[in-house]
Image (cartoon, rainbow, N blue to C red):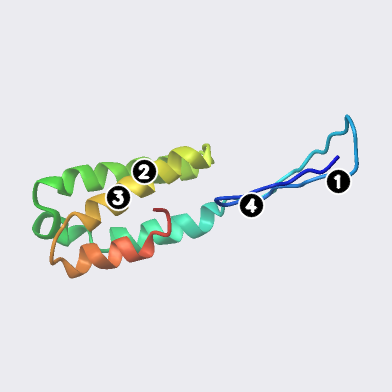
Amino acid sequence: MNNTNNFYGNVTGVQIQQGTVNSDQKQNFLEEFDYEKVFQIIRKIKKYDPMFDEEYGQLASEMRDKLSEIERLLKERENPSKIKVLLGDIKNLSLGVAGSVIASGIAGLLPMG
């Protein structure tokens, strides 16, 4: 009996057992979410708050709301997936602001994409 495995994309975390019948394996991934690092990023972004109205226009209040929500979630050590979604929203807002040096810098601070 021959087995052939073809991978046509990312295979991170894949384990293959060869020559075994009816077996299983468990994998545990312990990637800790760095709440403090995200807190530092949010603090850096909030330093530019006085310029949000000029840089983001009508989106300034949405930007502020999302930053406040992230701070709340970080303080409560909420599920990282909620925080990552909001970070992605902030990045998208910043990428949508054409020609803004501040927004471009903020987008560059956020690794989530």
Residue 11 location in percent, x, y? Answer: 63, 51
Instruction: Determine crowd level at label 2: few under 14, some 14-19, many 20+ residues with C-alpha closer than 10 A.
Output: some
- Distance of mark 2 from mark 4, alpha carbons? 25 Å
Q: Is residue 34 left or right of residue 56?
A: right
Instruction: Determine crowd level at label 1: few under 14, some 14-19, many 20+ residues with C-alpha closer than 10 A.
Output: few
Q: Amino acid at mark 1?
A: Gln
Q: Earlier in the sequence, mark 1 or mark 2?
A: 1
Mark 2 or 4, which is nearer the eye? Answer: 4
- Distance of mark 2 from mark 3, alpha carbons? 6 Å
Task: Name the residue rendered at 14%, 54% in the picture.
Answer: 56
Residue 21 location in percent, x, y? Answer: 90, 33
| Residue in front for this viewpoint, 17 or 86 | 17
Task: Name the residue rendered at 53%, 37% in the picture.
Answer: 79
> Which disc is residue 36 wearing?
none
Is mark 2 in CB contact (under 8 Å) with mark 3? yes
> What residue is shown with label 4?
12
| Residue in front for this viewpoint, 1 or 77 | 1
- Distance of mark 1 from mark 2, alpha carbons? 42 Å
Task: Name the residue rendered at 53%, 52% in the picture.
Answer: 35
Q: Is residue 26 left or right of residue 104?
A: right
Mark 1 or 2, which is nearer the eye? Answer: 1
> Which disc is residue 90 wearing?
3
- Distance of mark 1 from mark 3, alpha carbons? 45 Å
Instruction: Determine crowd level at label 3: few under 14, some 14-19, many 20+ residues with C-alpha closer than 10 A.
Output: many
Furthest residue toward right: 20
**Badge 4 element:** loop
Q: Earlier in the sequence, mark 3 or mark 4?
A: 4
Is mark 2 in CB contact (under 8 Å) with mark 4? no
Task: Name the residue rendered at 26%, 41% in the picture.
Answer: 65
- Distance of mark 3 from mark 4, alpha carbons? 28 Å
> What residue is shown with label 2?
86
**Badge 2 element:** helix
